[in-house]
Amino acid sequence: MTRRVTSFDVARLAGVSQSTVSRALRNLPNITPATRAKVARAATELRYVPLQSGRSLSTRITGRIAVVSEALTNPFYPQLLEPLRQRLADQGYQTVLIGDHEDDALTVAALSDGSYDGVIDTTASRTSRLPRAMAEAGLPCVLVNRMTDDPDELSCTFDDEAGAARLAGLLIELGHTDFALIAGPEQYSTSARRERGLRTALDEAGLWIPDRRTKHVEFGADSGHRAALELLAQPQRASVLFCLNDVLALGALNAATSLELDVPGDVSVVGFDDIAIAGWDRFALTTVRCDLEALAAEAVDMLTRLVRGLTVDGSRTIEVEVVARQTHAAAKAAVVR
Amino acid sequence: MTRRVTSFDVARLAGVSQSTVSRALRNLPNITPATRAKVARAATELRYVPLQSGRSLSTRITGRIAVVSEALTNPFYPQLLEPLRQRLADQGYQTVLIGDHEDDALTVAALSDGSYDGVIDTTASRTSRLPRAMAEAGLPCVLVNRMTDDPDELSCTFDDEAGAARLAGLLIELGHTDFALIAGPEQYSTSARRERGLRTALDEAGLWIPDRRTKHVEFGADSGHRAALELLAQPQRASVLFCLNDVLALGALNAATSLELDVPGDVSVVGFDDIAIAGWDRFALTTVRCDLEALAAEAVDMLTRLVRGLTVDGSRTIEVEVVARQTHAAAKAAVVR
DNA sequence: CGTTGAGTTTCATACGTATGCACAGCAGGC
DNA sequence: GCCTGCTGTGCATACGTATGAAACTCAACG
């Protein structure tokens, strides 16, 4: 059990004061090149690494960002987290993974102990109080992918409504009239906004989705699987399963396989997000591409600006585009009957 | 810009000293119930949250564990990370995600600044120097899933060799003689040990895999895809693609689909790990089940014991079992020709 | 030769919490 | 009523770094 090497040890070996060590190693100005070299040599020799807690006690800077995320077993989140982590690392920040407590208060307490310079929240529900609590605690916070109902809370999101509307438009043009919907929880903005985009587009075409063809479930492949089994078992099956994200859609495709239904021959299935698996040959899912790299870049840029005390324009929206793959087809000429 | 609430503020409001606040809030003994209540009330009123950096400067305890992981775009890692994060949270630790730098030295520097109570390394290569560096820095470290060539370095791994041997045995019994191998990098113990298990089993049956039917690639779905395309294009195609993990196998299945080959009719494909996607209807991959919950539980138990200064028995191995799904079949009676 | 001033280094202290030790209060024993 | 021992609280300091202000060095200038 040996004592840790401190800046005082380096100072003694280099023959200077502790404060000079501190300044020299951080390349502050007004240090003679000779002194700088002496200090650097001593630090290397002693394998000195500044203690982060001492540093942050003094500066109030931690170099850590808390990222609140859903369980990583939902394949969407790793795909979002990876570019976030990468971008944060590029900016010199460590990523601390915070699980989504049911209870906001627990999360708030965990985040307010001064361990973080900022917070990225990817789990906000429309009524989430986390952003406000963070503001009160003086901690910069950016919502990513989802947003709350308060438009003043800073967020980076995709254009969910437009994406859903465009994808719906594609299917309407192909003659589909019988839509079934597998949606996520209504308190998530992603689900709510995509649903609104879909319903608006249908409405403009004189179409609608009856309640019995609407399922609201948790976002998850198994939820999508179950919901699809029920919808596909209905008499006069819908011709489209419109899933509000890819994970639900992949579950639906698996359900179709287990029922030995052909996609898109028997039913079209579409998703939203374009996660990597959606592009695999075995799925070739028609979906809406969401550029998670771009989202992460914007979010990290916004957050780091806040952390540095710079101004931020306001929330940002990332455009999306339909990716037409092979899980959709033209409607059969049902009108003929 | 308002000053942070400190234990001194709480002390003043409660009419006691700072040290009493410190002791009362941590429920140390020798505090009168009345005093404890006063302090608790004051702390609540001021919304006091102890500053972590002050705490850890004094105690040298951070409550954080660094988890070194590959990119989360490889679906295996989220599945490993989630139970690790969960177990660590149960034990009161935050999880800090450390990306796998090419350069060990960078990682070592990042880990030695006193920000962590321990390290979980899921990216070790057989010659990785990280565990030794951590030992020198006095930081507890446990290798998870992979191990180095030094048997003294603490690890939690699966019984890779036995798993591969058993799976190979199943295929040999079904009459397969023409194996192709899609392996990972040889410097990863997972790949090396699974390959050894496979080759030993084949050898005992008088079989072997020619070099032209062996591909060593990065672990990744696209690598598996490319390798499978090459192997499946060979004249006198192998009857089995033996993939050393599921991610490779899923890539291979996608490749088979793109070539319009039937699995297992035209070729059997097997994997290793049993990640969630492998069980989806569209894949139904025959593979080796690795209980990641159990692995995470063992690893976290081992690491937290080290952190608390308790003794640890030594490395641990988790048993695995073959999961026979639908991507393998009996060999065609090729001997007849 | 004294003065100014720029450049370099040191001194002293702040950051917030935890904890060894001293001290005060109080009961019980003779 | 004095000593012993035990309990609850306060005092002082340690943890390691950063930084404003003071002090020192040295060259240039009048």
Image (spheres, coloured by chain):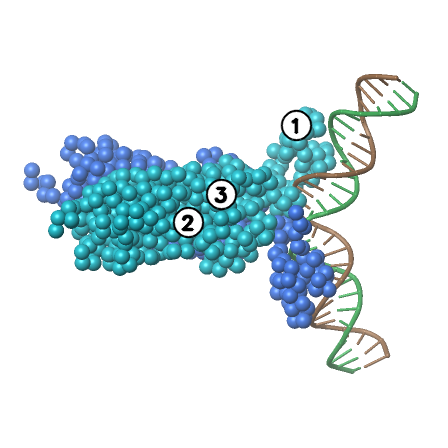
Chain colours: A cyan, B blue, C green, D brown
Horizontal side, residue D24 vs residue A265: left or right: right
Residue under numbered circle 1: A37
| Front residue of this view, candidates A122 and C13 | A122
Please say if the residues under marks 2 and 3 sit with CB atoms less than 8 Å apart.
no
Horizontal side, residue A212 vs residue C3: left or right: left
Label 2: how many Cα within 10 Å (few below 14, some 14–19, many 20+): many
Q: In this rendering, does residue A136 appear at all? A: yes
Label 1: how many Cα within 10 Å (few below 14, some 14–19, many 20+): some
Furthest-left residue in this view: B336
Residue under numbered circle 2: B81
- Residues tagged by mark 2 and mark 3 found on one chain of the structure: no
**Mark 1 falls on what kind of element?**
helix
Disc with the residue nearer the chain's start (3 vs 1): 1
Label 2 to label 3, Cα distance in Å?
A: 31 Å
Task: Identify the mark at residue B67; answer none if there is no mark.
Answer: none
Residue under numbered circle 3: A315
Residue type, label 2: Leu
